[in-house]
Amino acid sequence: MAKATKKQALGRGLSALLKDPQNDIQSAEDKNADKLVGHIVELDLDSVEVNPFQPRTSFNEDNLKELASSIRELGVIQPITVRKLDFDKYQLVSGERRYRASKLVGLETIPAYIRIANDQESLEMALVENIQRQDLDPIEISLSYQRLIDEINLTQEQLSERIGKNRSTIANYLRLLKLDPIIQTGMRDGFMSMGHGRALINVSDPQKQLEIYEKILQKSLSVRETEQLVREVNEGSKPAKTSKKTAAVPTSYKKGIKEFSEYLGTKVDVKVTKKGSGKLSIPFSSEEDFIRLKKLIQGED
């Protein structure tokens, strides 16, 4: 919890810096710009406007209300991104759902990353440097990877080359962002590890994800125990395999089965379906036994 408070205080400090007309940062070369690029800032919602060229124009009201409920409970986990228009004026780059949901809740401020003129290279350097830090939690790393992909327009392969990480490692971090926000918060607060999160990703039902998360907290489950629980949940949710209906072996077959068994020197198994088709199984105990049976069937001496 102390970590979260520290981040919020830092965001408020930067907000005060941005509200000072004497420090109106317009480009990456301006004084104090390095304190802004790559950092989270608490912005007044009223100072942010939506992008008129946003291709997405319709938002599902039910999903928006669900997000608003999550934000009311946990706050905005993933900051929005805005670009600076003028003094204390910003325009959304990404995160309109989070922006709208925050307004529904009645928040006055929202955590944001601010893009300023000619800060592309500075932003990339700041994000890459941030990723190399040792005290980042898995979700912070995931968000940094996602920002590099979205805002610097990198593919996962290009990102892999820039930061010296395997593509599979990057993909595993990015998948964590698909977890329920409550679970993401638990990871950020250190209640469970990335290994637990990677196991939970394999559960497609969000409600079951949360149920397993509660068990992790209540029983202090290890990653291996969590993986086992996930397997059990997934296997329990799969429809039972339907086997072909078999019929009783007709009496007329039984004499022939006995003769087969006596001739081959091994018990022969016959299964017959209700449609009349069937399968004849002849077991063998070793390679030599297999060769013996083969010779008998082929009529060889």
Image (cartoon, rainbow, N blue to C red):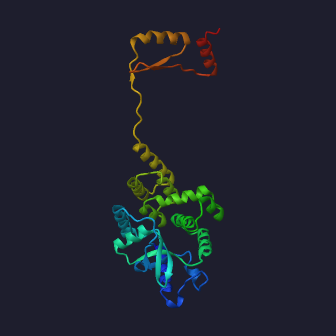
Q: Answer yes or no: is residue 80 visible.
A: no
Depth check: give the residue in front, 45 or 173. 45
Question: Which quarter of the rendering shows the N terminus?
Answer: bottom left
Q: Quick check: 249 above or below 232?
A: above
Depth check: give the residue in front, 288 or 171. 171
Q: Answer yes or no: is residue 7 visible.
A: yes
- In terms of image quadrants, where is residue 136? bottom right
Depth check: give the residue in front, 183 or 221. 183
In percent of the image, x 57 and y 67: which residue is there? 148
Question: Which quarter of the rendering shows the C terminus?
Answer: top right
Q: Quick check: 265 above or below 72?
A: above
Provide residue 175's location: percent of width, then percent of height.
51, 57
Return the residue found at the far bottom. 22
Q: Quick check: 86 above or below 59?
A: below
The tally of labels here is: 0
In percent of the image, x 42 and y 47: which residue is there? 233
Provide residue 92's location: percent of width, then percent of height.
46, 73
Provide residue 54's location: percent of width, then percent of height.
45, 68
Depth check: give the residue in front, 268 or 180. 180
In percent of the image, x 49 and y 53: which residue is there? 199
> In the visual, does 159 lie left or right of 258?
right
- In terms of image quadrants, where is residue 43? bottom left
Return the residue found at the far front. 53
Provide residue 206's location: percent of width, then percent of height.
40, 55
